[in-house]
Image (cartoon, rainbow, N blue to C red):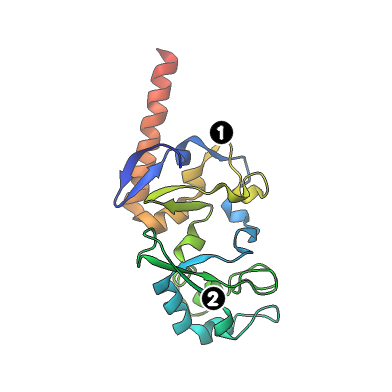
């Protein structure tokens, strides 16, 4: 993980969020869903909450998915301190994609939340919401898993939109409005320092 300088709440912020970004017209919103094709890790509590809403989620599934909730998770529980409960479990792969992805690459958990009048991410696992951001050892940084393979998950050091701004909705969801404001303040201080050095 890249060097960090800033702490917001219980998280440290990787400098990658300020030093890398997206080309014009490209960003996480153009998601291809490839990032979750091999399954994703979810907190054990998120796993339990998903199963509690299984009937609503099943209503959003198509013929490419399994409506048998016993086929939704791989059953392997891992210890991981970056998850709120300290434990996580992987989603299963069904028809070469995450059990919750439909044939069009849409998340059935997210669609079920919207259908219930909730925020699109209300029931969605946090790490799914954040990608291509990731939390490792309490550090929020960039996950290079699909760097150079998918535009929505590829950043560079030459950019008009810094990574943290491209992921404003995700970071606000995680850190709150006040937390995101601290990111903007920090970035402004970096820009000011660079301008001072350039004109000195």
Q: Nearer the viewer, residue 191 or 103?
A: 103
For residue 49, which numbered disc appears in the image?
none
Residue located 70% across and 78% down the image: 64
From this view, report whether residue 83 is shown above or below residue 27.
below
Q: Nearer the viewer, residue 142 or 169?
A: 142
User: Of helix, strand and loop, which one carries label 1?
Assistant: loop
Q: Position of residue 170 (x, y in %)?
A: 46, 56
Q: CA distance from mark 1 to mark 2?
A: 37 Å
Relative to residue 28, is residue 19 drawn left or right?
left
Q: Which residue bears the numbered disc 1?
A: 157
Q: Which residue bears the numbered disc 2?
A: 73
Tag 1 and tag 2, C-beta contact below 8 Å: no
From this view, report whether residue 21 is shown above or below residue 134.
above
Residue located 42% across and 78% down the image: 49
Label 2: few (<14), some (14–19) or many (≥20) C-alpha neighbours in 10 Å: many
The quarter of the picture where residue 105 lies is: bottom right
Q: Position of residue 71 (x, y in %)?
A: 59, 81
Q: Position of residue 97 (x, y in %)?
A: 66, 68
Q: How many marks?
A: 2
Residue located 39% across and 19% down the image: 196
Q: Position of residue 186 (x, y in %)?
A: 36, 37
């Amino acid at each position: 993980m890249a060097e960090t300088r800033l702490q917001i709440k219980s998280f440290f912020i990787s400098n990658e969020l300020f030093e890398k970004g997206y080309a014009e017209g490209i960003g996480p919103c153009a998601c291809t869903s490839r990032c979750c094709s091999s399954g994703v890790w979810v907190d054990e509590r998120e796993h339990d909450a998903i199963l509690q809403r299984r009937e609503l989620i099943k209503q959003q599934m198509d013929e490419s998915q399994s409506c048998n909730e016993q086929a939704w998770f791989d059953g392997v529980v891992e210890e991981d301190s970056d998850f709120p409960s300290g434990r996580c479990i992987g989603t299963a792969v069904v028809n070469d994609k995450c059990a919750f992805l439909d044939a069009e690459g849409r998340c059935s958990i997210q669609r079920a939340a919207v259908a219930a009048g909730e925020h699109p991410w209300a029931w969605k696992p946090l790490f799914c919401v954040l990608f291509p951001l990731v939390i490792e050892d309490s550090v929020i940084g960039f996950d290079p898993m699909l760097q150079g393979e998918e535009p929505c998950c590829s950043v560079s050091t030459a950019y008009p939109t810094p990574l943290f701004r491209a992921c404003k909705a995700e970071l606000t969801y995680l850190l709150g409005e006040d937390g995101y404001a601290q990111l903007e303040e920090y970035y402004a201080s970096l820009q000011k320092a660079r301008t001072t050095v350039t004109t000195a």
